[in-house]
């Protein structure tokens, strides 16, 4: 579980470094083997990981984090 969570965080950070700043844009990049009908659930999963990254200061955003928020590296 911890390895999976860390891998997801690495994927998020890579997206941000590549200029992908919104969760709906990240999901197709991160979930290439997933049926697109599952993307809404994947977005919520990425949001959960993003909140942890916000809490640890690894990413930032203005306002409350949602799937529509623009995220960035600090």
Image: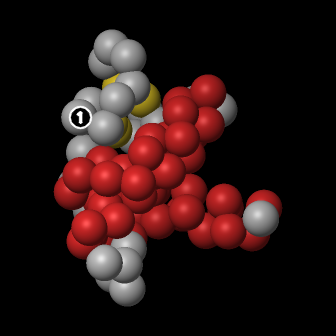
62 vs 32, nearest the viewer: 32
Residue nearer the viewer, 43 or 50: 43
Q: Position of residue 46 (x, y in %)?
A: 46, 50
Q: Residue furthest front?
A: 37
Q: Find the residue positioned furthest to the right.
A: 2
Quarter of image, res 1: bottom right
Residue 34 in picture, x, y percent from top left: 37, 78
* Residue positioned 34% across, 29% down in the render: 66
Question: Mark 1: few, some, or many residues within 10 Å (few <14, many ≥20)?
Answer: some
Q: Answer left or right for 45 relative to 39.
A: right
| Residue at mark 1 | 68
Quarter placement of the C terminus: top left
Q: Nearer the viewer, residue 72 or 34?
A: 34
In the rendering, at what x and y percent does residue 63 appear? 33, 14
Q: Residue 10 sits in which quadrant?
A: bottom right
| In the depicted structure, whether residue 22 falls above or below residue 2 | above
Colour scheme employed for the rendering of this structure: secondary structure
Q: What residue sits 66% from the left and 60% below the top? A: 5
Name the residue located 32 percent from the left edge and 53 percent from the top edge: 40
Which residue is farthest top?
A: 63
Q: Position of residue 42 (x, y in %)?
A: 41, 58
Residue 48 versus residue 62: which sits nearer the camera?
48
**Which element type, helix, strand or loop, lies under badge 1?**
loop
Q: Residue at x 27, y 31 (%)?
A: 69
On the question of residue 20 being in view, the answer is no
Q: Is residue 21 left or right of residue 15?
A: left
The total of numbered circles placed on residues is 1
Residue 51 visible (yes or no): yes
């Amino acid at each position: 579980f911890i390895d999976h969570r860390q891998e997801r965080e690495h994927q998020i950070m890579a997206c941000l470094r590549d200029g992908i700043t919104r969760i709906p844009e990240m999901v197709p990049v991160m979930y290439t083997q997933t049926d697109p009908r599952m993307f809404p659930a994947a977005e919520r999963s990425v949001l959960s990981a993003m909140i942890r990254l916000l809490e640890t200061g690894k990413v930032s955003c203005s306002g409350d984090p949602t799937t529509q928020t623009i995220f960035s590296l600090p």
